[in-house]
Amino acid sequence: MVGTPVGSHYITGAPVHFDAMTWFLKGFLTAPIVFVLGLNGFGKSSLIRRLITGAVAAGETVLCMGDTRPDYRALVERLGGQVIEIGYGNTTLNPLDVGQLGKVIDQLPDVDQRRQVAARVEAGQVTIVGGLIELVRGSRIADYEEVLIAAGLRELYCPATGFTHAAPPLLSDLLDVISGGSEQLRRFAEEDDERSYRAGTKALRRSLRALVEGPFGAVFNGHTTTPLDLHAPAVCVDISRMPEGDTKLLAAVLMVCWSTGFGAVAAAHALADAGRGPRRTFGVVMDEMWRVLGVGAFMVDRVDALTRLNREIATELIMCSHTVKDLLAFDSVAAQAKALGFFERARAKIIGPVGPEEIDRIRAAIGITETEKLLVTSWAAPRPPSDDDLDPARRETPPGTGCFLLKTGEAAEPGIPFRMNFTATERDSDIHNTNRRFDNLPANDTNEETTR
């Protein structure tokens, strides 16, 4: 009975309570990380919305950074939170805008703390620009190119340019300064003259040009339209207007959103450490991880760096994916192991209905008893429909909907099977309706006409 009420025990009917932050603070988990895994249509997003509601009620600020469907917008609006839309012709997101983290530097009274935060800002900018270049290229960025990006950023932040962390440059400004090839940049590139510098930086300049122009530029080469408001109880960045087929662009937006969210959390803690703000806890939802990881093995390190520091920044992390295969779809064994580490590092795993092959893959990472295997796979195999199901009065929810198995640790100890049922308030609010596109379709009387 500790944490957010998530449902009733599948066997006994007893109430089941869980959320990663509360269980961590009570000592039940060693880190507040939860991974939700399961097939489409069985209630993963509904469960995460319940966890978000509980987190906000407990005083956490929840950030849903990169809502692709959107799954969480309606809930955040009901909770009085902030909704930010990102898409073509709508809003822009500046990767060099470190948001709250850059704005707090001048508010910090301690010189050493200001220097530490400024160093983190630069490191974050280099990481995100490097990640975007890797997405454009489909391969890793070279080490000397990252050095040039860092050197270019230092030139942009010199007093003569007018750029500050509160008023950051754009990607086009970074391209201009690297193309300019000052003496200092040539020294960093270990090139003796302008001609060799131009030849040595051609690949980097081409990649930056690709980020500035075209689809990437429409989203990233502009000042951030709407900054995050951490005074809101929850924030949802709605990216559902992004083109579904452009996997690289969608992955880039998700990565920048996640980086922005973690940067805002770090800023709040920096102010708290300086006595300029309250102590707070946060929750970050990283849904659709497969979209970023699926672009290539080179993205694993980028996501890994983002997810490792959640305990240090007092942040509950909720990760979600459809299958363990999303974490193993790499040729490199090292990349597979690191990606699987996202699942293994989660101290709590919530497994929804999955097939027999998937449960076997899960068993390679955590202990699953034979009884649990049969239970979870049975949830994924509802009985075939019959004529009785045409009667709305007799129609029932598929047996596996809302059913989950909560596992903590790696030992082959039984987990907690539970079923989440909607409360009357949830039903009335319609926040769990992810099929709104079908709501206004005309009634389907085909079966009746066929019967006649």
Image: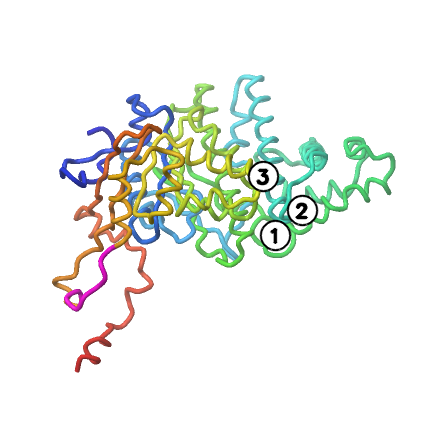
Secondary structure of the residue carrying numbered label 3? helix
The disc placed on residue 172 is 2
The quadrant holding residue 98 is top right
Residue linked to disc 1: 217
Q: Amino acid at mark 2?
A: Ser
- Give the side of residue 410 with respect to residue 13, left or right: right
Secondary structure of the residue carrying numbered label 2? helix
For the residue carrying disc 3, how many other residues have a C-alpha within 10 Å: few (<14), some (14-19), or many (20+)?
A: some
Image quarter in which the N terminus is found: top left
The quadrant holding residue 186 is top right
Q: Amino acid at mark 3?
A: Ile
The disc placed on residue 128 is 3
Q: Which residues are magenta?
A: 382-389
Per the model, the C-alpha gap separating discs 3 and 1 is 15 Å
Instruction: Between residue 451 and residue 270, name the one nearer to us.
Output: 451
Asked if the residues shown at circle 2 and circle 1 are in contact, with their CB atoms under 8 angstroms apart, the answer is yes
